Image: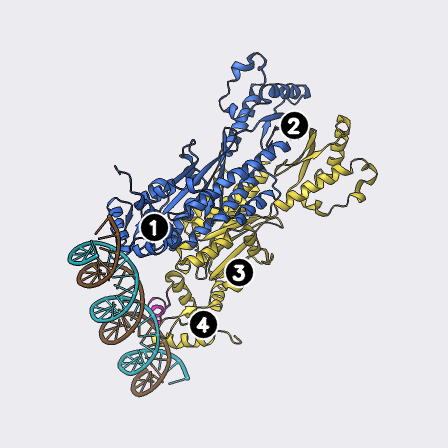
Chain colours: A yellow, B blue, C cyan, D brown
Amino acid sequence: MSKELSERKKKILHALVDVYIATGQPVSSADIQSKYMPEVSSATIRAELSALEALGFVEQPHTSAGRVPLKPAYQLYVGDIDASRDKALTDAETAFIRNRFTEKLDEVKDISRRAAEIISDVTNYTSFFVSNCNVNVMIEEIKLVPLKNGKGLVLIVTDHGIISDKTIDLDGNLRQEYVDTATRLLNKVFGGRMICELEAIDLDGEIREELDGFRDIFDAVITIIQSYMAEHRDDVVVEGALKMLDYPEYNNVEDAKNFLAVISDHNSVSELLSDTEDSIEFSVRIGKEDSGVDKCAIITAAYRVGDEIVGKAGVIGPERMDYKKVIGVLDYMKKALGAVLDGDKDDK
Amino acid sequence: MSKELSERKKKILHALVDVYIATGQPVSSADIQSKYMPEVSSATIRAELSALEALGFVEQPHTSAGRVPLKPAYQLYVGDIDASRDKALTDAETAFIRNRFTEKLDEVKDISRRAAEIISDVTNYTSFFVSNCNVNVMIEEIKLVPLKNGKGLVLIVTDHGIISDKTIDLDGNLRQEYVDTATRLLNKVFGGRMICELEAIDLDGEIREELDGFRDIFDAVITIIQSYMAEHRDDVVVEGALKMLDYPEYNNVEDAKNFLAVISDHNSVSELLSDTEDSIEFSVRIGKEDSGVDKCAIITAAYRVGDEIVGKAGVIGPERMDYKKVIGVLDYMKKALGAVLDGDKDDK
DNA sequence: TGCTAGCACTCTTCCGCATTGACTGCTAAC
DNA sequence: GTTAGCAGTCAATGCGGAAGAGTGCTAGCA
């Protein structure tokens, strides 16, 4: 691809991808001519298609068939979408998105699930949402609650909810005074901190002198926070996994099984998204080598609050998916999600 | 079926179901004769099969094909399993089950997941486990923990873990004395009770005179417990959902999709199990009308601790599934699970 | 030089038809 | 009551020819 493609070749490629996305069938020169380029003859288009085939943009399933786009064709097509993004969504669709988002949502988890639902419903593809739960979580308060059974519940109140699923042994130290001092020290050290700061905290540098006798408790609390973070690192939601089976590309059980096995394993979904560059707005990966799943394309978008990435949404569909629409939806979701998250912040 | 089947007819039916379970192909008279009844000729068996067809036990897909068992044939087959249950599992299989159960398991939730995994792995069918979480949960202690933000965390310590995801507004009543009294009253009323008792508690009958001024808190706590119970009524775990796609019965995408849609909706799974009689040991339901899913059979078993049903395990597979093995596995799981749960009890 | 009409060529898809093979049902003999 | 033997039925397989879709090529035209 040393040389730039002629305008006409580009136009033909766009038309071909458009038609192929809509029909899933090999596209003939006549198809392109009748619907997109009535000013030239099909023979001319045939000649151009021949050239595009030599350049590796399209291929024929067999001699007497039309052309099917290859990866470079999709890439060119996707690369040109940004400019023509104007009317990707109908008014009904944007209204649908707004409505679904204004319904009552209790927890952060609900928001990502809802977002994934909306994306899947509007695009008709499988969607996922990976939220980075640990970002922006601040510790407001820590309490030690002595229980009857000799243990103590560690209660960590954050601005995103309460972490309280772990107890520690309080040994013989059940004296109220001891618990009070420990609580005061814990709040002094941890209060007001973001939990992601605590991943590699250096206690000794902080309050070495006061630490004597509370070392165990501090270690226990740090362990609790770290294990919480590990458990909640990537919160993966997948929606509409079965929608992929509607597309003829996945109309055989073997492929369907492979796809579902990948998509229902949250770890591998998380991996699918992990290696995207954080800097780019939309990542489009096509084909097995890029997307990790056979005959698929994955489009992902990163969602931010301020500078932090709070989550990544993605759509996985057949290579010939409706890129314009998907990118339009993901883009619109940025606005909608931003509004919801900001509103959420104000609430608290 | 006014008259009892002759012994020979029964033997032929059993053989036919055996072969059909193994092969999935219509079974011919010669198949049965060569492997199961060399003492008679295939012509004799043909005559018997003809009679069994007239009685509605078997059918022919077409004139020149072998016979396929119908629901009554399966039912008879299943009904006779109990007696011959002797060697349904190999030693390797029972060892596998024991090993998988002695690996570390943290929570009740883990146990049901592990049980479902084991059942699915040993049988090679889709399995599910519905645990009735609310049974046998006793309230050990209730604490009110005032938080900085003016709210109070309601902490309910049970012998199965801590319920602590809800806060209540403490209004202006933050005086320590008030909180202490409320806590004392709450423990007096709720302490030591099973949470399922609280579904329809009558506060007024209990401690009417002391209740003044704490009504709000009591109502809030009851609401919290009830909503917890509602959320945790049926904890559904499904394992090996994709295994069904390995069987030729589900070798087309349409059926596979329907199956997966049902199986991944926890509500409908819960329904699949809900209408089984609690009294019988194993419930076997065959066909769409009984099982709710097309071309499927469902076998469920109830697991008890004492008299209470703590969970139901089930296997869903093609009609021609290996009933002997499945029932053997579910039965062995009763013992294994019983051991685990009792050990669990001792721990605490 | 670029475009186009026309035509031969290629390859898939579909349909009909004959063949094969797997079973059964029936009948006559034991 | 059982069996051997045989005719009959039906699905599955394979093959050939016709139809259809689309291309590539070539000769002529602007």
Q: Secondary structure at mark 3?
A: loop
- Residue that appears at 76% across and 38% down: A216
Residue contact between numbered discs 3 and 1, judged by CB atoms under 8 Å: no
Residue contact between numbered discs 4 and 3, judged by CB atoms under 8 Å: no
Q: Secondary structure at mark 4?
A: helix
Depth-wise, is mark 2 or mark 1 nearer the camera?
A: 1
Chain bearing mark 3: A
Q: Position of residue A143 (x, y in %)?
A: 69, 32
Q: Secondary structure at mark 2?
A: strand
Q: Which residue is mark 1?
A: B16
| Residue A99 makes an appearance in the image | no
* Residue A26 within the magenta-colored segment of the rendering: yes
Q: Position of residue B348 (x, y in %)?
A: 64, 31
Q: Which residue is mark 3?
A: A292
What crowding class fits label 1: few (fewer than 14 Cα within 10 Å), some (14-19), or many (20 or more)?
many
Q: Which residue is mark 2?
A: B145
Q: Which residue is mark 4?
A: A7
Start-end of magenta stretch: A25-38
